Image (spheres, grey):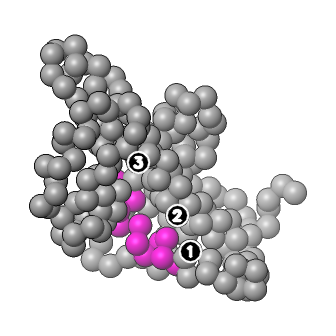
Amino acid sequence: REIGRIVERGGARFVDGGIIGPANRKPGAARLYLSGPEAAHVAPLFAAGPVSAVKLEGPVGAASALKMAFAGWNKGMQALLMAIRALAMAEGVDQALLAEWRISMPEVPARSERAVHENARKAWRFVGEMEQIARTFAQAGLPTGFHDAAGEVYRCLAGYKDTPAPPSVEEAIAALLKRTSREPGSILL
């Protein structure tokens, strides 16, 4: 919003945009959400490309807010799953947790594996995004702690940036647990 105000004060027109979806060239795989009074004029410019442009109702900032909300859930949930697996491993209950998930939420064990395999090598990119999401929460008067913590999870995994293959879940969890030096079972209950 601040960038939009600066641009408009200079006499130019501004359209806010936020991309959601994978970075590939398959048409329709990613969406470019646009907002602001000029969004309807800009959206058709993307008709021939691989990104689908979607005009949002709302002022400048609405497209960015949607991007923050979507990434807050998507990447935040991935970080939460990795942190939960780390807690379970640190406490020696990882296999019990996986068994319970298989009973009560059968999709979660595989989702927790994908969280590591799909995100560890990109974690360095997500640190700043989690910080930005936390600031967006703060601006809306909401707690920021969850996404601050998600940023810390990704910061711990940033060392996998240029590795040829993603780490195993155990390797990634070891990177998360390096932050502490406590013994398993020493949690305060």
Of the residues tagged 1 and 3, which is closer to the observer?
3
- Mark positioned earlier in the residue sequence (1 or 2): 2
Q: In the image, is residue 115 part of the stretch drawn in magenta?
A: yes
- Residue 173: percent from left, percent from top: 55, 69
Residue 67 marker: 3
| Residue kind at label 3, given as amino acid type | Lys
Q: Position of residue 74 (x, y in %)?
A: 49, 60
**Can you say which quadrant of the picture contains the C terminus?**
bottom right
**Cα separation between marks 1 and 2:** 7 Å
* Label number found at residue 78: 2
Q: Main secondary structure of the magenta part?
A: helix
Residue tagged by mark 1? 112
Instruction: Check residue 27 in the rendering and tell me which mark sits there, or answer none.
Output: none
Residue 86's spot in the image, x, y percent? 62, 67
Q: Position of residue 156 (x, y in %)?
A: 47, 57
Q: Of marks 2 and 3, which one's residue comes earlier in the chain?
A: 3
Q: For marks 2 and 3, give the CA distance.
A: 16 Å
Examine the rendered structure and indicate whether residue 135 appears above or below residue 162.
above
Indicate which label's residue lies in the foreground, 2 or 3: 3
Mark closest to the chain's N terminus, 1 or 3: 3
Q: Is residue 66 left or right of residue 11?
A: right
Residue numbers of the magenta segment: 113-125
Q: Secondary structure at mark 1?
A: helix
